[in-house]
């Protein structure tokens, strides 16, 4: 199975998945053709911790500034985990870093998790 990447359609702004190495991608919804970035410039996405807007950025980046609210979001490494205390029963929960929320297996409470962000973008975890 070929590795896939993603980009935003130039026509309808839908997120498109495509096989890495493709030079162009045709949108199945609007038929617009969007040029794929060159190798090494593949895109990834995350949810802004400030306004919950889906952000796309060049894979490998470490910080992404939201164009809507100007929040600077830290990009987590793949397979990185984070910890938070349940907002209800205070049990320590482990979840994939960057997730917007985590459900407690003990009490079923959903704790919202803020993606690390700050006004200057350089605060560490």
Image: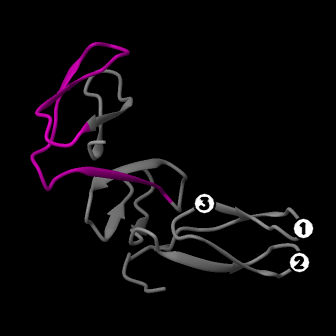
The answer to whether 125 is drawn above or below residue 48 in the figure is below
First in residue order: circle 1 vs circle 3: 3
Q: Residue extending furthest front?
A: 1
First in residue order: circle 2 vs circle 3: 2
User: So how many labels did they put on this image?
Assistant: 3
User: How far across and how far down the image is residue 45, in percent?
Assistant: 39, 52
Q: Which residue is depicted at the point 89% across and 77% down?
A: 89
Q: Which residue is depicted at the point 87% across and 71% down?
A: 106
User: How far across and how far down the image is residue 58, in percent?
Assistant: 24, 56
Question: Residue tagged by mark 3?
Answer: 100
Label 2, secondary structure: give it: loop
- In the picture, measured across the screen, residue 107 lies left or right of residue 43, that is right
First in residue order: circle 2 vs circle 1: 2
Dot 1, how many residues are within 10 Å of its Cα: few (below 14), some (14-19), or many (20+)?
Answer: few
Dot 2, how many residues are within 10 Å of its Cα: few (below 14), some (14-19), or many (20+)?
Answer: few
Label 3, secondary structure: give it: loop
Determine contact: label 1, label 3, CB under 8 Å: no
Q: CA distance from mark 2 to mark 1?
A: 7 Å
Dot 3, how many residues are within 10 Å of its Cα: few (below 14), some (14-19), or many (20+)?
Answer: some
Observer-side mark, 1 or 3, equals: 1
Q: What range is drawn magenta here? A: 19-48
Question: Residue tagged by mark 2?
Answer: 89
Determine contact: label 2, label 1, CB under 8 Å: yes
């Amino acid at each position: 199975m070929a590795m896939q990447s993603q980009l935003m359609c130039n026509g309808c702004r839908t997120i498109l998945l495509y096989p890495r190495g493709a030079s162009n991608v045709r949108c199945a919804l609007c038929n617009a053709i969007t040029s794929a970035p060159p190798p090494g410039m593949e895109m990834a996405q995350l949810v802004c911790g400030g306004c919950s807007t889906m952000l796309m950025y060049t894979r490998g980046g470490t910080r992404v500034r939201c164009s809507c609210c100007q929040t600077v979001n830290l990009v987590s490494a793949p397979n990185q985990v984070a910890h938070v205390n349940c907002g209800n029963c205070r049990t320590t929960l482990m979840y994939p870093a960057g997730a917007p929320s985590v459900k407690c297996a003990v009490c079923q409470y959903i704790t919202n998790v803020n993606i690390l962000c700050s006004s200057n973008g350089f605060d560490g975890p």
